[in-house]
């Protein structure tokens, strides 16, 4: 029986679920200040939130958010010699990001209050 | 941008496999996906100089296999259709596509077919009851061995031997209510399954 491994596995699964739940908000937040193309979004997520996700996860999500009307896209010629697809928030996307951020802030501050004794006791 | 033929060919092979696996999506949507990923692979593999074999391999590896990536796009598209559509026909069409992608999709399709079939059978029995009052309805049919079975009949055939119709004129309100309820419940069940499946998918 490998209980420690099972515990680690369970903690990892929980962390994956947590990151997955945040991903949509993180992508919308990354686009809050202006348009970005896919690779820039990935780099913004890595640098500003430690949210390291694979390209195979982010591109389908961008496509889905676009089909739901939260993002719009446009092709822009680049110096690299090939066009890049830039994404920007639509008004519905901005509203969605603001709503999700408000929920996140409420939830995280109440969780922080609850977790304060746990953090002190570690 | 300088890129060797071998690397270029590798990228094109990957994108061709991806295109093949995206065939159930609209052509314009597939073209957009392919061009976006081509642009991404070129950017990613040239972030530290000219693209070479190692940087192209690394860029492709981060995307995952063409088959898995295509499945992510197609599944998302199917789940979106299922979540927003309320038409049983469109839901069934989307479920057929989902069933080709995963075992979960197949299981939901089977449950959905059973739910819609039973709902439609109840509705049809209720609708035909006024036209075939003696034969349409819910029948309990006994066999010679003492076993019995329930049968929903629209009344086009003659009354079964050793059979007894159970509901009489109550077939009309009961069939309309239960049939409509079952169709609505099946639709809600499918949407619930689609949401659960989307939430349960693990990040690669």
Image (cartoon, rainbow, N blue to C red):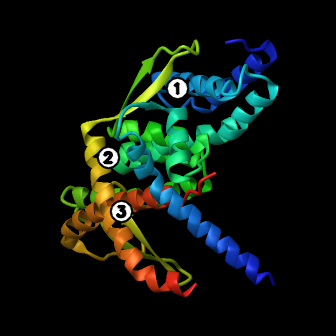
Q: Could you tell me which residue is drawn at 35 percent across and 41 percent down? A: A32
The disc at residue A122 is none
Query: Is residue A45 visible to us here?
Result: yes
Residue B45 on image: x %, y %:
69, 27
Which chain does tag 2 point to?
Answer: B
**Image position of B78 with respect to A80: above or below:** below
**Image position of B168 with respect to B147: above or below:** above
Q: Are marks 2 and 3 on the same chain?
A: no
| Residue neighbourhood size for the residue with mark 2, other residues' Cα within 10 Å, grouped as few (<14), some (14–19), many (≥20) | few
Q: Are marks 1 and 3 on the same chain?
A: no
Q: Residue B15 versus residue B169: which sits nearer the camera?
A: B15
Q: CA distance from mark 2 to mark 3?
A: 34 Å
Residue B104 on image: x %, y %:
57, 57
Q: Is residue A27 left or right of residue B4?
A: left
| Residue neighbourhood size for the residue with mark 1, other residues' Cα within 10 Å, grouped as few (<14), some (14–19), many (≥20) | many
Mark 2 element type: loop
Q: CA distance from mark 2 to mark 1?
A: 25 Å
Q: Which is more foreground, mark 1 or mark 3?
A: 3
- Residue at numbered disc 3: A104
Q: Could you tell me which residue is drawn at 27 percent across and 55 percent down? A: A99
- Residue at numbered disc 1: B30
Which chain does tag 3 point to?
Answer: A
Q: Could you tell me which residue is drawn at 53 percent across and 28 percent down? A: B33
Which chain does tag 1 point to?
Answer: B
Residue B132 on image: x %, y %:
24, 58
Q: Residue A92 versus residue A115: which sits nearer the camera?
A: A115
User: Which one is earlier in the sequence, the residue at label 2 or at label 1?
Assistant: 1
- Residue at numbered disc 2: B87
């Amino acid at each position: 029986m490998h209980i420690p491994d099972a515990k680690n596995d369970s903690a990892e699964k929980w962390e994956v679920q947590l990151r997955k739940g945040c991903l949509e908000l993180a992508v919308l937040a990354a686009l809050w200040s202006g348009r970005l193309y896919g690779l820039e979004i990935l780099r913004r997520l890595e640098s500003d939130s430690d949210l390291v996700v694979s390209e195979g996860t982010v591109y389908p999500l961008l496509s889905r958010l676009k089909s739901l009307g939260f993002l719009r896209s446009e092709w822009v010629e680049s110096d690299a010699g090939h066009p890049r697809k830039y994404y920007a928030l639509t008004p519905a996307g901005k509203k969605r990001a603001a709503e999700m951020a408000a929920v996140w802030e409420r939830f995280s501050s109440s969780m922080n209050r609850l977790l304060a004794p746990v953090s002190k006791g570690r | 941008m300088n890129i060797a033929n071998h690397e270029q060919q590798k990228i094109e092979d990957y994108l061709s496999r991806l295109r093949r696996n995206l065939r159930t999506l609209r052509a314009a949507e597939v073209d957009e996906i392919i061009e976006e990923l081509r642009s991404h692979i070129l950017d990613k593999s040239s972030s530290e100089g000219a693209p070479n074999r190692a940087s192209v391999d690394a860029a492709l590896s981060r995307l995952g296999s063409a088959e898995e990536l295509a499945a992510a796009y197609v599944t998302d598209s199917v789940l979106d259709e299922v979540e927003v559509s309320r038409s049983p026909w469109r839901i069934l069409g989307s479920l057929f596509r989902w069933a080709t992608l995963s075992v979960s999709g197949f299981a939901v399709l089977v449950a959905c077919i059973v739910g819609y079939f039973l709902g439609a059978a109840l509705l049809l029995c209720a609708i035909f009851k006024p036209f075939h009052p003696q034969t349409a309805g819910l029948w309990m049919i006994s066999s010679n061995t003492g076993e019995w079975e329930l049968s929903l009949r629209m009344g086009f055939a003659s009354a079964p031997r050793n059979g007894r119709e159970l509901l009489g004129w109550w077939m009309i309100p009961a069939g309309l209510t239960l049939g409509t309820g079952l169709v609505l419940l099946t639709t809600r069940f499918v949407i619930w399954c689609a949401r659960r499946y989307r939430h349960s998918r693990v990040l690669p």
